[in-house]
Image (tube, rainbow, N blue to C red):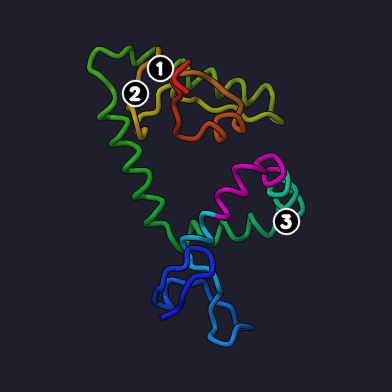
Amino acid sequence: MKTCNKCQCEKFLLEFYKNKEAKDGVRTICKSCDDLRKKTYTFKNSEVVSKNKSDYRLKNKEKISAYMAWWRKEYSHKMCAYASKRRAILLGATPKWADKEKIERIYQQAALMNKLNPEMEYQVDHIIPLNGELVCGLHMHENMQILPAKQNQAKKNFFQIEGAF
C-alpha cells in the first residue's frame, strides 16, 4: 500500500504507474490523479499538443507507417470487429424511409473532392453522432455533411446543442 501525494488516498501499488528510479518502483501520484492531470493539461493546451503531435507525425512518417502496417496485420481481428460494429451501427441507425441514393451521392461527392484536392482529405460526418453520449442521430442524408478530415476528427463523437452551454 502507498499514499498518493495528490489525493492523499492509500492505494495498492498496482494503482500507480511504474518508475524504475523510485525506491518502491512506482510514481508518487496514483494513476487516476496522473490521468486527470494529463487530461487537464491537454484540454488547456490543445493547440500546443496538437502541433506537437502533428510535428511528430511529419518527422516519423515511415516509422508510423511501418508500425501501423504491423498493427493491422497483427490485430486484424480487431479491425474486423470494429468494421462489423460500425456496419451494425449504420444498419441500426438507417431508417427504412432514408433516401439511400442521396446518402450514396454524399459519399461519392466526398470521394470526388478527395480526388480533386488530394492535399486536403475530406470525410463524411454525421452532424448528430450515430453513437453519441447524450444523443444518437440517424444515418440519413439530412444528418450528413462533408468536412475536412482534421475538423471531423477534432469534432470526435460530440454534439453540442446551440445555446445549451
Residue 36 in the image: above or below residue 107: below
Q: Is residue 113 magenta?
A: no
Kindly identify which numbered label has been placed on residue 143. 1
Disc tally is 3
Q: Which residue is mark 3?
A: 60
Three-letter residue code for mark 2? Gly
In x, y percent, where is residue 130?
35, 29
Please tell me whether residue 49 belongs to the stretch shown in magenta: yes
Q: Which residue is mark 2?
A: 137
- For this view, does 34 lie left or right of residue 76? right
Which element carries disc 2, helix, strand or loop?
loop
Between residue 129 and residue 117, name the one nearer to us.
129
Residue 56, position as x, y percentages in the image: 72, 53
Work out whether residue 106 or residue 1 is closer to the camera in this orientation and state it.
1
Residue at the spot 37% in from the left edge and 13% down from the top edge: 101
Residue neighbourhood size for the residue with mark 3, other residues' Cα within 10 Å, grouped as few (<14), some (14–19), many (≥20)? few
Which numbered disc, 3 or 1, marks the residue that appears first in the sequence?
3
Q: Say if 65 sits above or below 131 in the image.
A: below
Q: Secondary structure at mark 1?
A: helix
Q: Give the structural element (helix, strand or loop) at label 3.
A: loop
Residue extent of the magenta highlight: 37-50
> Distance of mark 3 from mark 1, alpha carbons?
36 Å
